[in-house]
Image (cartoon, helix red, strand yellow):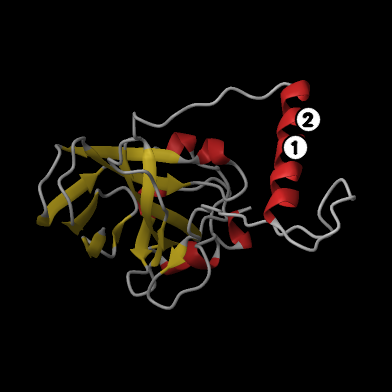
């Protein structure tokens, strides 16, 4: 579980590296690696614009508290929308185990030109070298997801083949006879009991949990279009 993220080098030039200090807790012994990804969302409507800036892989860890520094390069400007409307974007920190995402921390990234004149009259073609970025560190969006960790499936479960139609009819007949013989002063002329009660056991996955009293997943504003 990610317990804290500190963003360094902020604000900074758009083409500067990203530096995150990540603290996480492990409650049980893990048998496989943890994976952390830093993703820059270039366009809210096009996943193809997303760029994985870097990936950090951590060997299986024992229970305890851990901390590391994640430094990643900036997004490639050649893969970003080349228009003047680049004022808001999103940076995502993803945590995965066995290729399953279990936590996500998202931040809005506000960009603007360092030159006041360029802010008033931005060029048609974006000049990324003159852009500054500012990560909204005070408003992170944290979401957790239920996953299968190291739970092993039992190997001693009995597996029953599906009954044929004839076997199903025989089973239903035997069940009705047993019901009739076990009850007193009951008219068993009917083929089936007058009422039946079904008990259903469900094992539904837990809904995603929003932390820090933030109820909405992070979404770039329409200015990204």
Say whether marks 2 and 1 touch (CB < 8 Å).
Answer: yes
Q: Residue furthest right?
A: 189
* 224 with respect to 104 (left or right): right
* 146 with respect to 177 (left or right): left
Residue 216: mark in rendering = none
Residue 100: quadrant of the picture: top left
**Nearest the camera: 67 or 119?**
67
Residue 202 picture location, percent across and down:
56, 53
Quadrant where the image shows the N terminus: bottom left
* 135 with respect to 61 (left or right): right
Residue located at (37% from left, 69% from top):
136
Q: Residue furthest front?
A: 185
Residue 150 picture location, percent across and down:
27, 40
Whether residue 134 is situated above or below residue 49 in the rendered picture: below
Whether residue 63 is situated above or below residue 36 in the rendered picture: below
* Distance between the alpha carbons at the discs numbered 2 and 1: 5 Å
**Nearest the camera: 144 or 125?**
144
Q: Answer few, some or many: residues within 10 Å of disc 2's Cα (few below 14, many 20 plus, some between 14 and 19).
A: few
Residue 43 picture location, percent across and down:
55, 47
* 131 with respect to 16 (left or right): right
Residue 222 picture location, percent across and down:
63, 61
Residue located at (41% from left, 52% from top):
146
Whether residue 210 is situated above or below residue 12 in the rendered picture: below
Residue 172: mark in rendering = 1
**Residue named by callout 2:** 169
Q: Answer few, some or many: residues within 10 Å of disc 1's Cα (few below 14, many 20 plus, some between 14 and 19).
A: few
Residue 137: quadrant of the picture: bottom left
What is the secondary structure assignment of the residue under circle 1?
helix
What is the secondary structure assignment of the residue under circle 2?
helix
Residue 59: quadrant of the picture: top left
């Amino acid at each position: 579980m990610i317990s804290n993220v500190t963003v360094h080098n902020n604000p900074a030039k758009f083409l500067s590296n990203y530096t995150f200090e990540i603290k996480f807790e492990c409650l049980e012994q893990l048998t496989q690696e943890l994976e952390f990804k830093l993703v820059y969302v270039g366009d809210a409507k096009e996943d193809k614009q997303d760029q994985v800036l870097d990936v950090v892989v951590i060997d299986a860890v024992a229970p305890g508290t851990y901390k590391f520094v994640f430094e990643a390069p900036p997004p490639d400007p050649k893969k970003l929308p080349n228009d003047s409307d680049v004022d808001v974007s999103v940076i995502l920190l993803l945590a995965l185990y066995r290729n399953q995402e279990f936590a996500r921390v998202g931040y809005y990234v506000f960009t603007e030109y360092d030159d006041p004149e360029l802010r008033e009259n931005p060029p048609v073609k974006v000049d990324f070298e003159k852009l500054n970025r500012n990560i909204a560190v005070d408003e992170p969006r944290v979401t957790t997801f239920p996953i299968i960790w190291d739970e092993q499936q039992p190997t001693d479960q009995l597996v029953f083949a599906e009954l044929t139609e004839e076997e199903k009819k025989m089973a239903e007949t035997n069940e009705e006879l047993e019901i009739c013989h076990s009850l007193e002063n009951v008219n068993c002329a009917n083929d089936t009991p007058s009422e039946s009660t079904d008990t259903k056991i469900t094992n539904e996955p837990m809904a995603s949990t929003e932390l820090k009293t933030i109820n909405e997943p992070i979404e770039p504003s329409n200015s990204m279009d």
